[in-house]
Amino acid sequence: MTLTAQPHIRPAQPSDKAPILTFCQHTWDDEADYIPDVWDVWFADPTGHILVADRNGQPVGMTRLVQLSDTEGWWEALRVDRAFRRQGIGHQLTQAALSLAQSLGLTTLRTCVSVTNASMHPFMKHQGFSPLGDYAVYSATASEGAPTALRLLGVDDCDRAWAAIDSFVAEERDLLFVARGAKWQTLTPNNLGQRLAQGWVWGCFEGDTVISLFIRSQMEAPDGTLWIGWLGGTTAGVQTALNDMRYLAHSLGFKAVGGFLAQSETLATLLKTVGYDFSDTSVYKLYEKPLGEQ
């Protein structure tokens, strides 16, 4: 009996686009894959590394590693051609991504998996990833009118914005934010300052006291939505911000506002109260792995 040779794992090449997008048409039975929408952006991104499983010159799988900071990485888009599944290619791609992350000096790697993707959760545990919590995609239609409570903050507000965030955070997980394209990293004074400089941070106030803070994010394939990267505050402050964000979205030319928000009964009630909806098929489990533990 001849054993099937394992594919070679290599960096993506321009010629990989057509065959990979062809097999990505069949990733799932009931929904379209997003890879065709982001491939060109990903391929041009110097912080990202697309790895391809190549068998005799034919791409049969892919995955991607993104370096978000000096120590944090994001792993995503593990795909294997249906004709080549159950041959260990997914495991091989995963190990290649983990090895690459370590070679880049990353100490923490995160990823998220749809809660409906039942087969992947045992795989994540086997690969040494621990769950941090569930996040749901909430969204609301933008509303005509101007925001009345949210105020745009600037770089001079960095110290008090950070002090407010520190007061809102109950546990370390609450300091994670969606940096871009559904990729979580740790919120620090440095990247808060970067977003303040971009004009991507708004706050609600009671007098001079910040009662809620909203940091904008973005997806890699623009979809007309003002995306929430981080949201925190008092219960009343968050409710005020959520309501005002619908007006902010409209004033900025977006059709909707939405984001990946932590699953909690209190937040779910607030979101429903101010008209945000979610689909129970759009819930994701966030995972984290300290590197050096392969």
Image (cartoon, helix red, strand yellow):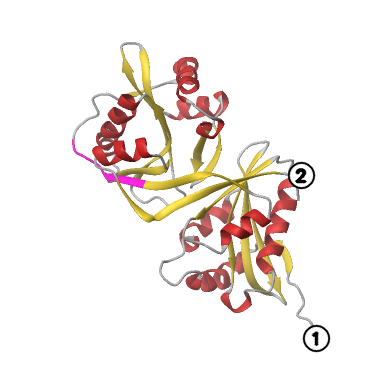
Q: Neighbour class for label 2 at 10 Å: few (<14), some, many (≥20)?
A: few
Residue 165 x/y as whole percent = 47, 23
Picture coordinates of residue 188, whole percent (x, y): 56, 27
Q: Is residue 286 left or right of residue 228?
A: right
Marks 1 and 2 sit apart, C-alpha to C-alpha, by: 35 Å
- Amino acid found under the numbered disc labelled 1: Thr
- Residue 220 in the image, given as x and y percentages of width and height: 47, 49
Residue 84 visible somewhere in the drawing: yes
The residue at 55%/71% (across/down) is 18
Quarter-of-image position of residue 95: bottom right
Relative side of 234 to 51, left or right: left
Q: In this view, does 11 lie to the left or right of 235?
A: right
Looking at this rendering, what residue extends furthest in the top direction? 208
Q: Is mark 1 on a helix, strand or loop?
A: loop
Q: Give above or below for 199 relative to 105.
A: above
The answer to whether residue 26 is left or right of residue 250 is: right
Which of the 4 image quadrants contains residue 31? bottom left
- Would you name the residue on which mark 2 appears? 292
The quarter holding residue 260 reads top left
Which residues, given as a range, are shown in magenta? 138-144
Look at mark 1 in the image and give the residue it sits on.
2
The residue drawn where x is 64% and y is 74% is 86
Q: Where is residue 246 in the image (x, y as percent from the top left)?
A: 26, 37
Q: Is residue 201 visible in this depiction of the protein?
A: no
Q: Which residue lies furthest to the front in this view?
A: 265
